Image (cartoon, rainbow, N blue to C red):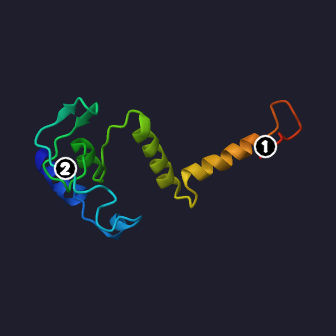
Amino acid sequence: DFIAEIKLCGEALQHHTCRDVCHKYGHPDDCWFLFPHEVVEQSYFDDTTNSIILKCLDGTVNYFNPHLLVFCHHNHDLKCILSGKSAKAAMFYISDYITKNDEKMHQVLTMLSKAVAACPPSGSEEPATQKA
């Protein structure tokens, strides 16, 4: 039964328990991953923030898609990120996560910008002069 499988997978894979990683980066008293979520009895649209607030009956469970959960058997966290600061933050987080680089994204972009500025203009053999 699909509903029973959602419950089984959800309890095993989607429940958050704080660990040491949750409290590093200067978060000794609160969770880095913002758990527990606020309990919300019913999903609604918030006019003041132009946000969709999702139903959440257990503040320690990641938001999930039941089909992904059952068919992939892997934890995940769904967030709707369309534009703005949240989208930029997500892009930086994802690129940092998948590259596991010691350099942060803003440092990589700064280095890339300097490298591009040092390249000769298109069709030229001479390197571009770099301004201080």
Looking at the rendered structure, the kind of residue marked 2 is Glu
Residue tagged 2 = 38
Q: Nearer the viewer, residue 57 or 107?
A: 107
Residue drawn at 15 percent across, 49 percent down: 39
> Is 85 placed above or below 100 here?
above
Residue 92 in the image: state x and y as whole percent.
49, 47
Query: Regarding mark 1 in the picture, which secondary structure is present there?
Result: loop
Neighbour tally class for label 2: few under 14, some 14-19, many 20 plus, Cα within 10 Å? some
Of the residues shown, which amino acid type is indicated by label 1? Lys
What residue is at 80 percent from the left and 43 percent from the top?
130
Tag 2–tag 1 contact (CB < 8 Å): no
- On screen, residue 45 versus residue 82, left or right, reads left
Among the 4 quarters of the image, the one containing residue 67: top left
Horizontal side of residue 83 vs 38, given as left or right = right
Determine the image quadrant of residue 120. top right
Along the viewing direction, whichever of 122 and 30 lies nearer the viewer: 30
Residue at left 83%, top 39%? Answer: 128
SS under mark 2: loop
Is label 2 or label 1 in front?
A: 1
Rendered view: 4 above or below 126: below
Image location of residue 36, percent across then percent down: 22, 56
Dot placed on the residue nearer the N-terminal end, 2 or 1? 2
Q: Residue at x 10, y 42 (%)?
A: 41
Expressed as whole percent of the image width and height from the top left, the position of residue 101 reads 56, 58
User: Which residue in the structure is indicated by mark 1?
Assistant: 131
What separation in Å lies between label 2 and label 1 (alpha carbons)? 50 Å
Residue 30 left/right relative to 115: left
Which numbered circle lies on residue 58?
Answer: none
Image side of residue 69 versus residue 88, left or right = left
